[in-house]
Image (spheres, rainbow, N blue to C red):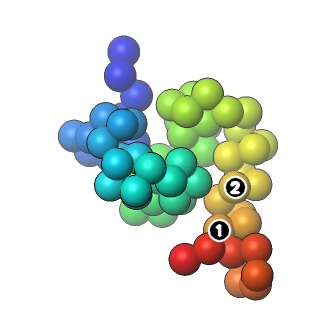
């Protein structure tokens, strides 16, 4: 079974679209595609709390956040 982060895209295609940045791909899947943190965690093999921390860090303003 191939994990899908975006409609019609494989995980690898989504990562490529995000310049190979896993964290950016997670945020994109969560925000733009409406994927749950659980689905994203399963797709990349991370614990759900870790995915939540990654997304929170990217969404929060400040020096730790990336565009």
Of the numbered discs in the image, which one, if any, rests on residue 67? none
- The residue wearing badge 1 is 58
Seen at 40% across and 57% down, the residue is 18
Where, quadrant-wise, is the N terminus in this rendering? top left
How much space separates mark 2 and mark 1, taking CA atoms? Answer: 6 Å
Rendered location of residue 64, percent (x, y): 76, 74
> What's the residue at 38%, 36% (across, down)?
11
> 10 Å neighbourhood of mark 1: few (<14), some, or many (≥20)?
some
Query: Disc 2 marks which residue?
Result: 54
In the picture, the quarter occupied by the C terminus is: bottom right
Residue drawn where x is 54% and y is 39% of the image: 40
**Side of 42 relative to 29 (left or right):** right
* Rendering quarter of residue 9: top left
Q: Is residue 17 left or right of residue 47?
A: left
Marks 2 and 1 in Cβ contact (< 8 Å): yes
Say which element carries label 1: helix
Answer whether residue 59 is visible to the viewer in this image.
Answer: no
Residue 57 is situated, as x and y percent measured from the top left of the image, at 73, 66
Q: Nearer the viewer, residue 24 or 3?
A: 24
Q: Nearest the camera: 16 or 10?
A: 16
Q: Quadrant of residue 12?
A: top left
Mark 2: which secondary structure? helix
């Amino acid at each position: 079974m191939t994990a899908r982060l975006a409609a019609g895209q494989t995980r690898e295609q989504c990562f490529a679209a995000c310049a190979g940045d896993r964290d950016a791909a997670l945020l994109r899947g969560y925000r733009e595609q409406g994927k749950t943190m659980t689905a994203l965690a399963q797709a990349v093999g991370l614990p759900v709390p870790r995915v939540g921390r990654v997304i929170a860090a990217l969404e929060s303003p400040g020096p730790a956040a990336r565009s």
